Image: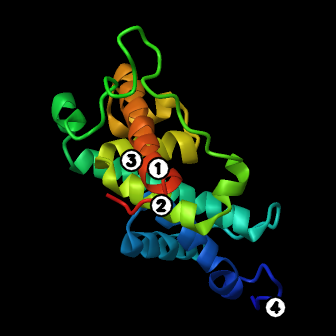
Amino acid sequence: MQLMDTPDNPHDWLAEHGDYLYRYALARVRDSYLAEDMVQETLLAAISGSAYAGKSSARTWLTGILKHKIIDLFRRQSREIPLEAPDELMEDAPGMEEFFQADGHWSEAPKSWGEPASLLQQDQFLQMLQQCLDKLPHKLARIFMLREVEEADNEEVCKDLAISTTNSWVMLYRARMGLRKCLEINWLAGGELK
């Protein structure tokens, strides 16, 4: 069988979609070498697996394969690395006390972040967000990425990370508060990453 020279030709997938797939993987696994491996595994699976049917764009199809490869990686990692005790997991994470008064009101109301859509388009913001994610404990960063970026449902996240529903909500809350604090200090205040 001879492949036609079309935009959906498997020989062109790396050139056409490689950078996009790499950025997608890097945002989720936060390791450049691992992201490269994920893209390679995706392309190998796409080429050696079932043929591309053309029902969606090649990028959409490849991204779907990559997403499943990343989920498989997270599952393997959660089986290989024992979860820390919840108290140890939360040691380095920010607590609620610094954000709220005893009566439940904000100690200091969140600052305005401007227009979220325009901020997400700025490379500097994305770099700062990645740096803030890197400062979070690994499990908190992972649950944030699964829930907020991958938009996985809570049941799936709990199963993947082998945690309880209550623990997932606490971890997600602490991840959000940690990111909020880091971004307010380093992005909104224009400071250097601390």
Which SS class for mark 1?
helix
* Residue type beneath disc 4: Asp
Mark toward the start of the polypeptide (1 vs 3):
3
Tell me which amino acid carries mark 1: Leu
88 relative to 164 in the view: left or right = left
Residue identified by numbered label 3 = 141
Residue 66 can be seen in this image: yes
Give whichever of discs 2 and 1 has the lower sequence position. 2
Q: Residues within 10 Å of mark 3 (few under 14, many from 20)?
A: many
Residue 128 circle label: 2
Give the alpha-carbon distance from disc 3 to disc 2, as whole Å.
14 Å
> Where's residue 125, x and y in %?
56, 60
Furthest-top residue in this view: 103
Residue 142 lies, with reference to residue 86, above or below; the image says below
Q: Label 4, on which residue? A: 5
Is there CB contact under 8 Å for labels 2 and 4?
A: no
Contact flag, marks 3 and 2 (Cβ < 8 Å): no
Q: Residues within 10 Å of mark 1 (few under 14, many from 20)?
A: many
- The residue closer to the viewer here, 88 or 194, is 194
Q: Earlier in the sequence, mark 2 or mark 4?
A: 4
Where's the N terminus, which quadrant? bottom right
Q: Amino acid at mark 2?
A: Met
CA–CA distance between discs 2 and 4?
40 Å
